[in-house]
């Protein structure tokens, strides 16, 4: 796996831990705090600090080295210093299952431009053909229509509802399960 890939409009990078990237990640999360937190677990108290973000970059980097998780941070080619999103392929289980789960986040100001789809198409290709996975799963809350539309556009198939799947904002929430088979 390489540390940088490009699409027509985007650069996708596996970031090495550094103060510079920690600041960029923190800026990304701060800009989108309200929209992201609607769909995610409660954050640790120090989540919105450079130290926490640097620790997470180090954690993600170590997982990538061992092919357990690949979090690509997304930048536009014309603004390579500003994170606009991330796509992640995690809980990679090889060889028997050949599967992983995926998730993504994009800066609200970059929605409805096809950028998430462009990044995910490349990520899916990497997971299927460089990592050799057979199946990618994604979970979305019922009211997350933007995520559901993205999954549909990528060819993911709805498989069912996972009741009380994850604790979001302190409440157990149902999630819809989607999958894509190579």
Image (cartoon, helix red, strand yellow):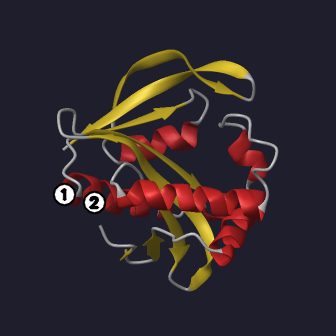
Left or right: 143 in relation to 152: right
Give the answer, above or below, for where 170 lies relative to 59. Answer: above
**In the image shown, does 144 or 63 lie closer to the viewer?**
63
Q: Residues within 10 Å of mark 2 (few under 14, many from 20)?
A: some
Give the answer, above or below, for where 80 lies relative to 111. Answer: below
Q: Residues within 10 Å of mark 1 (few under 14, many from 20)?
A: few
Q: Secondary structure at mark 2?
A: helix
Residue at 60% x, 67% y is: 84
Q: Position of residue 46 (x, y in %)?
A: 80, 50
Q: Secondary structure at mark 1?
A: helix
Say which mark, if any, is on residue 126: 2
Q: Position of residue 2 (x, y in %)?
A: 32, 72
Residue farthest to the right, as pictured: 45
Residue for badge 1: 129
Query: In this rendering, does residue 122 appear at all?
Result: yes
Give the answer, above or below, for where 60 lies relative to 140. Answer: below
Quadrant where the N terminus lies? bottom left
**In the image shown, does 5 or 3 lie closer to the viewer?**
3
């Amino acid at each position: 796996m390489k540390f940088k890939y490009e699409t027509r409009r985007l650069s996708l990078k596996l970031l090495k831990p550094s103060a510079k990237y920690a600041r960029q990640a923190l800026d990304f999360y701060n800009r989108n705090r309200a929209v992201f937190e609607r769909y995610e677990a409660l954050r640790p108290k120090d989540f919105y600090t450079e130290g926490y973000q640097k620790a997470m970059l180090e954690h993600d980097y170590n997982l990538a080295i061992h092919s357990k998780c690949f979090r690509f941070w997304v930048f536009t080619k014309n603004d390579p210093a500003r994170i606009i999103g991330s796509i992640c392929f995690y809980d990679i289980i090889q060889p028997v299952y050949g599967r992983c789960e995926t998730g993504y986040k994009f800066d609200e100001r970059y929605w409805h431009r096809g950028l998430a789809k462009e990044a995910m198409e490349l990520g899916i290709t990497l997971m299927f053909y460089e990592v050799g996975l057979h199946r990618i799963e994604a979970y979305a809350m019922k009211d997350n229509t933007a995520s559901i539309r993205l999954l549909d556009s990528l060819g993911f198939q709805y498989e069912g509802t996972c009741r009380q799947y994850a604790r979001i904002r302190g409440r157990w929430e149902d999630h819809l399960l989607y999958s894509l088979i190579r």
